[in-house]
Amino acid sequence: MATGPADQNLVKQMNSALILDQLLATSPQSRANLAQHTGLNRSTISSLVSELIEQGLIREVGRETAYSRGRPGILLELNPAGGCIIGIEINVGYTTVILTDFTAHTLWRRHVEMDEDTPQAEVLALAEDLIDAALQAAIAHNQPMLGIGLGVPGMVDAAHGTLRFAPNLRWRNVNFRDLWGHKFGVPLYIENDGNASALGEYYFGIAKGCENFIFLGTGIGLSGGLMLNGQLYRGADGYAGEVGHIIVESGGELCSCGRRGCWETLVGPRAVIRGIVHALENGAPSLIPGLVNHNCEKITMQVVVKAANLGDQLALDTLSDVALHLGSGIANLINLFNPGLIVLGGTLTLAGDYLMPTISNIIVAEALSAPSRMVALALSSQGMDACVKGAVALVIDGIVREPVSC
Ligand SMILES: [Zn+2]
């Protein structure tokens, strides 16, 4: 059957995507290697590589040193100078913006903390100022601006660029594509913070190359991202992965989503700190008040971990409870998805020493033995920047999947 120009362009686009995806996963590689790994023939690889080099997205970096026969091939990698990307995370109490090159290397970073109750208009104005500053910083690098990636905590309609509902921010129906699409004049990608973080871990972090893993991260609540068969699993409407709102305790504590007994009411930092404050009000002995000048509003997960490091029993008991509840929930996720890896991110990484052994034990005790036998448990290698790096990954992912304009 004859193929028209539109079909040919689509095939070319998909083949270019294969090459970029390969180089994103493993760099550098020769043209022969790329042919072997993508299944494309050498002449197709050669012509597409020439185009991608011309576009500035990949570059040649010397020759292979180990080869079996013939001339050593020229090695290729993604070109850091392919363009700049802005990653932004808007979350409860802070906004972080980074400017990176095309390989997600951070060139510029700003992190601004604010009151958790800061009005939406103020948060958005601050975010816009930070994006303007990042755009200015990009000018100094003299590279094209490829796009802005945004990670937000809540249910995101990525196709329309809309944050539908963010319970912890108490925001509803914010259309970022309308707000920022024209204002900044570059492509805008938006995702739920858990999904963005999972993508960041897959491309640049601890989950690199792992096609089936689950990201669980805490900021205020508990977010999740499901990477299944090498793709973010978004569900029918893009709202999959809201693990924090799985009901684990019928009739339990009231959650920010308006329902009771969600998983994040047992393991999310806001709920955990509320529990500590309640225990302190009931006279529990603890070093925590002394660490925050007796101002309970200043208790954070960092403070709880610091107290645990000092041997504080309330902090140790609290983290032990968090580990038990995390472990049970993770065991259910293992039974459901059979992941190869569970990545813990956000403030969970601060408490890793206290959480990981218990979670591992609970997985063994509560998950089915077949899917739990091979699952690994790891802390995010991106720390508190998992989401903002993931926001950059959204832009790179978009370019990798549609590198050639038809
Ligand atoms: Zn909830």
Image (cartoon, grey):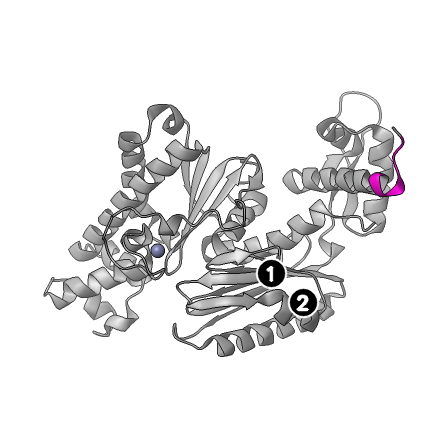
Horizontal placement of 349 versus 55: left or right?
Answer: left
Type of amino acid at the residue the image marks with label 2: Gly
From the viewer's perspective, is residue 125 above or below residue 234?
below
Task: Name the residue located 34 percent from the left edge and 62 percent from the top edge.
Answer: 256
Q: Quadrant of the N terminus?
A: top right
User: According to the image, label 2 marks what residue?
Assistant: 181
Question: Residue 160, image x and y in percent?
Answer: 61, 59
User: According to the image, label 1 marks what residue?
Assistant: 161
- Answer with mark 1 or mark 2, whichever residue precedes in sequence: 1
- Rendered-image quarter of ligand 1: bottom left
Q: What stretch is highlighted in magenta?
A: 2-7
- Secondary element under disc 2, as helix, strand or loop, is helix
Q: Do the residues labelled 1 and 2 touch (CB within 8 Å)?
A: yes
Question: Residue 324, image x and y in percent?
Answer: 25, 43
Horizontal placement of 74 versus 312: left or right?
Answer: right
Type of amino acid at the residue the image marks with label 1: Gly
Question: Residue 172, image x and y in percent?
Answer: 47, 67
- Secondary element under disc 1, as helix, strand or loop, is loop
Q: How far apart are marks 1 and 2 (CA)?
A: 9 Å
Residue 6 painted magenta: yes
Task: Name the residue located 32 percent from the left edge and 42 percent from the top edge.
Answer: 329
Say whether mark 2 is within 8 Å of ligand 1: no
Say whether mark 1 is within 8 Å of ligand 1: no
Q: Quadrant of residue 289?
A: bottom left
Q: Residues within 10 Å of mark 2 (few under 14, many from 20)?
A: some
Task: Name the residue located 31 percent from the left edge and 57 percent from the top edge.
Answer: 259
Residue 198 visible in the displayed image? yes
From the viewer's perspective, is residue 109 above or below residue 352?
below
